[in-house]
Amino acid sequence: MDDPHTGVLLAVLVFLILLSAFFSAAEIGMMTLNRYRLRHLASSGHRAARIAARLLDRPDRLLGVILLGNNFANIAASSVATLLALNLYGTPAIGIATGLLTLVVLVFAEVAPKTVAALYPERVAFPVAYVLGFLLKLLSPLVWLVNIMANGLLRTLGITIHGKTADQISTEELRTVVREAGTFMPQSHQQMLLAVLDLENMTVEDVMVPRGEIEMIDLDSDWEHILASFTTSHYSRLPVCHGSLDNIVGIVHVRKVLLLMRSGEFVRENLEKILETPYFVPEGTPLGRQLLNFREAQRRIALVVDEYGDLVGLVSLHEILEEIVGEFAAPAPGVIDEVQPQDDGSYMVSGSITLRDLNRRLEWDLPTTGPKTLNGLITEYLEDIPQPGTSLALEGYQVEIVRTRGTAVQLARIRPKAPKAAAGAGD
């Protein structure tokens, strides 16, 4: 009981438990660091972040030095506890000492430090990075030997530690990161970033102006009609054709036409001279790819063709950008809006509007995996051309056909879904 070595052994035991706690916290702190924030801090000149990043580049070496230290501390603590028990109470106390040491190590050297490190990884990892970097250099021969044996065992199991890119992030994971940015990013920025990620899931067919709605200049028309087409158009670039859209000869920029008008040289021959070569794209081109194609080709408008080479629509840079940032402006004067709210809460909707545009404007959830327009959705559902007055329910929305033109629905009245009853409402 009065052995002077008892106090020394007790001090050594406390030191070893603290050492074990240090390595336990270091392991969790280093491994739970946000790798993207770590890279940002390292590139910004944060010294501890640079050291931590270098250590994490070789996780086998990092774990080697941590586990060497941790296991040494735990085994040494067990030996010291045994000696301390023998000095104090003799052989019968060894079992009690082992049980008490297990509880102490579990609480003070494992659970508590690891919990703190998980909650505050940067506060723990950055200071310990200096110590771990020094220990890695000091114990490099031993760490190298341990890693050789461990990696050899992994290779026999078909596992390699080289060439792994653990920091890669998928599109869906990136989308989750953006959604969970919370107050760190304005909601408008979140929506734009999510829209950019969605571009690869959409094609030009989803946003193009259908063939039947393309404004064009017909060179076979009389000159007065051509002049009227330019003065009434709301677009800066127009396709030019002979007779129909099957014979497109070019694209004209209205600004060049105005310059010719101003100089008094606007005649049919000069109009043909300022035409740009038409630019055609397949209807299945992803929007992200088409956005890059517009930049590479220095174009803002493209004619969309199907698999047979037939013209099916027109897509412009404007439509793609609207998928990212939303509608730029209200309809131009004289142009009837495709969605008109009514006093009774319903909406008068043009049959030619795309379902994506309708969903975006009214925050609805009409299906977009099949037909692209409201007219297409209605006719596919009915498997027939409806007559005015026909009513139907589409995905919970009440739809009434107001006007048809030929074989297409021109105008429909849509009533939004009824709000769901609140949970726990009275009977």
Image (tube, rainbow, N blue to C red):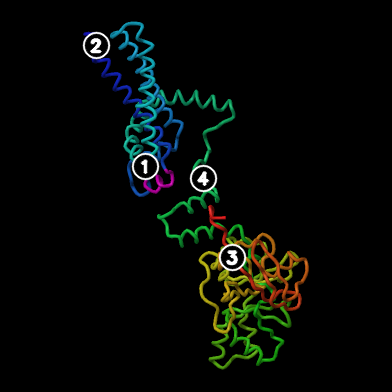
The answer to whether 91 is drawn above or below residue 210 in the figure is above
- Helix or strand or loop: what does disc 2 sit on? helix
Work out how far the residue at label 1 is from the one at label 2, CA to CA, in angstroms: 44 Å
Please give the residue where the numbered disc 1 appears in the rendered image: 50
Work out how far the residue at label 4 is from the one at label 2, CA to CA, in angstroms: 54 Å
Tell me which amino acid carries mark 3.
Asn
Tell me which amino acid carries mark 2.
His
Q: Are marks 4 and 1 in contact (CB under 8 Å)?
A: no
Q: Could you tell whether 223 is left or right of 21 in the image? A: right
Tell me where residue 4 appears, x and y as whole percent.
21, 10
Which residue ends up furthest to the top in the rendered image?
A: 91
Please give the residue where the numbered disc 4 appears in the rendered image: 168
Query: Which one is earlier in the sequence, the residue at label 4 or at label 1?
Result: 1
Tell me which amino acid carries mark 1.
Arg
Query: Which one is earlier in the sequence, the residue at label 3 or at label 1?
Result: 1
Disc nearest the viewer among 4 and 2: 2
Tell me which amino acid carries mark 4.
Gln
Q: Residues within 10 Å of mark 4 (few under 14, many from 20)?
A: few
Q: Magenta stretch: dominant SS?
A: helix
Q: Residues within 10 Å of mark 3 (few under 14, many from 20)?
A: some
Work out how far the residue at label 3 is from the one at label 4, CA to CA, in angstroms: 33 Å
Query: Which one is earlier in the sequence, the residue at label 4 or at label 2?
Result: 2
Name which quarter of the figure residue 207 lies in. Answer: bottom right
Magenta-tinted stretch: 34-41
Tell me where residue 71 appears, x and y as whole percent.
40, 22
Q: Are marks 3 and 4 in contact (CB under 8 Å)?
A: no
- Helix or strand or loop: what does disc 3 sit on? helix
Please give the residue where the numbered disc 2 appears in the rendered image: 5
Total marks placed? 4
Q: Give residue 17's mark.
A: none
Asked if the stretch drawn in magenta spans residue 40, the answer is yes
Disc nearest the viewer among 3 and 1: 3
